Image (cartoon, helix red, strand yellow):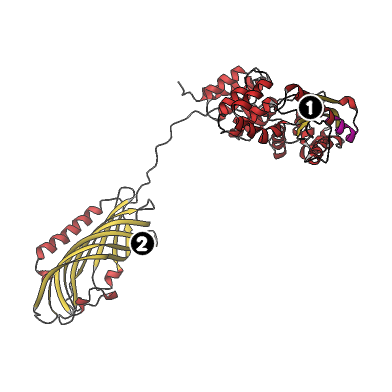
Amino acid sequence: MYIYKNETRRIALVGLFFVIAVTAFSQRTVSIKNNLLYDATLTPNIGIEAAVGNRSSLQLFYGLNPWNGYHGMKKLQHWSLMPEYRYWLSGEQFRGWFTGIHGVGGEYNVAGVKLPFGLFKPLHYNHYEGWFVGGGLTLGHAWKLSEHWNLEAAIGVGYIHTKFSRYENEECGELLERGHYNYVGPTKLALNIAYVFGKKAEPVLPPPPPTVKELYKPQYQLAYVTPQAEQEKSRQLSGKAFLDFVVNKTDIRPEYRGNAAELAKVLRTIDVVRQDSFTTITHISIHGYASPESPYQHNAYLAQARAEAFCHYVQSLIQLPAHIFSVASTPEDWQGLLTALDKMGTMDNIDAIRAIVTSNDEPDQKERQLKKQYPQQWRYLLDNIFPALRHSDYEVSYTVRPFTVDEAKRLIREKPQHLSLNEMFLVANTYEPGSQDFNDTFETAVRMYPDNETANLNAAVSALQRDDLITAARYLEKAGQSAEAFNARGILAVKQNRQEEAEQLFLQSSCKAAQYNLNELRQYLESMQPDR
């Protein structure tokens, strides 16, 4: 039989298996196992696995089927040796999932065997003798049954090369061929029962941390600023009225073109203030403008006369005292024309036209140059730009009465524009610092007074208190150069781990909070120094 033709090789391999087995017993953890699926083929087998390192192990499996079968017509004589390296994904050997690389080799004398899934059908009616060698990848899992017993399942896929002699499947069957075969597919299927014994691996403990001096925990102080109370809360509303007049006329005709809508817009603006019980109108100013397409003196007359007509018309409708009205005029709105040119972007000869508009020449001279040198562009400006230059700007000035804290708490949600910064600050002080209402009050204040340094500073301090450093930095850009502003910038620097800059900022501030914070910062920095 082929399997016994090279006894020296087989004995050497079995000897190697036991040499490795004895070596494994010198390792910290060893597992002896048996493949139950291999047993089902009546093939005695044994495996040994030893831990290597912290997450690895080496395994060697040996199987020998010496049975000659029934009358030599059906048999599965073979021997195999399968070394394997395993990497344990759980971090602990012999527990959980593992991957690996395995090799396989051996000899066989097989006849009349019907393999599952229709694999190698010629084995069913032929007799094969030969050897094989190969390897592949492994994936498996080990379950702990008790302190020493494990159950393992593993599957492997890879490549096997075999060289064989095929005979007729009968006594002294005739040699049919000699050849070789390359196989790619499953190379391993195991259900192992294992006994784990030997010295358990001692846990690798990290070295004890070096003794660290306890760091000082600074407590920094934020400083809000109380806004100055307004002696009189003065406010303004403004707008533009684009009224149409009959050529060379100055009287207001409400029904002419779009005048009805423009006049209604003006009255709505005034009524917003006039009908508010909290406000008192103190002044209404009207400023008239004419466009530059006629002689300057004539335009001066039209601008002033039309502004006065507009003032008289408004006064007659709302019945306010005459002394609160004032009228002014600009004969030609060259600045408005320049603004319109800047917004146009592209236009033939626009730079030359802009140079004429901004020159120091007399207005009538500018008009003549534009008409003569750029007649096409002048016609465009006359039709599309000049109508908007004929307008009357108006501004309604009014005062708002002072409010109690309770009134202010209600109005900050309904009409925050009526409140002064001081009134909003008093509202904030009625809430728990850091609460949502507290923070919302300072956010409302900075929204109503976006360019006020105190409003920006207090909003920044509120943001620092809730560690919203991005918002705090944005508000601090407009918070001015007060002592409290430098203190807030110092706290922002501390929170951003810029201690050296924070120290300089605290030094620039003269407020008590900054001096306290400087001392806290220095104690913290001192605690970071190693002991001498």
Q: Which amino acid is tagged 1?
A: Leu
Does residue 445 appear to the left or right of 96 in the view shown? Answer: right
Is disc 1 placed on a helix, strand or loop?
helix
Where in the figure is residue 274, as x and y percent of width and height?
86, 35
Residue at mark 2: 149
* The stretch drawn in magenta includes residue 122: no
Q: Quadrant of residue 209?
A: top left
Along the line of sight, the residue nearer the viewer: 270 or 241: 241
Label 2 vs label 1, nearer the camera: 1
- Residue 316 shown in magenta: yes
- As displayed, is residue 204 above or below residue 379? below
Instruction: Please tell me which residue lies in front, 200 or 158.
Output: 158
Task: Specify start and end residues of the magenta stretch as a single range.
Answer: 310-319
Q: Name the residue under label 1.
A: 302
Q: In this view, does 451 lie above or below 192?
A: above
Could you say where residue 272 lies in the image, as x and y percent from the top left? 82, 37
For disc 1, the neighbor class at 10 Å (few under 14, some 14 to 19, many from 20) is many
Q: Are marks 2 and 1 in contact (CB under 8 Å)?
A: no
**Quadrant of the image occupied by residue 80:** bottom left
The residues tagged by marks 2 and 1 sit, at their Cα atoms, a distance apart of 109 Å
> Is 184 displayed left or right of 214 in the figure?
left
- Total residue callouts: 2
The circle drawn on residue 310 is: none
The quadrant where residue 105 appears: bottom left
Quadrant holding the C terminus: top left
Name the one closer to the observer, 374 or 277: 374
Q: How far across and how far down the image is residue 244, in percent? A: 77, 36
In the displayed structure, would residue 14 be above or below residue 323? below
Label 2 residue SS: strand
Is residue 228 at all visible to an observer of this figure?
Answer: no
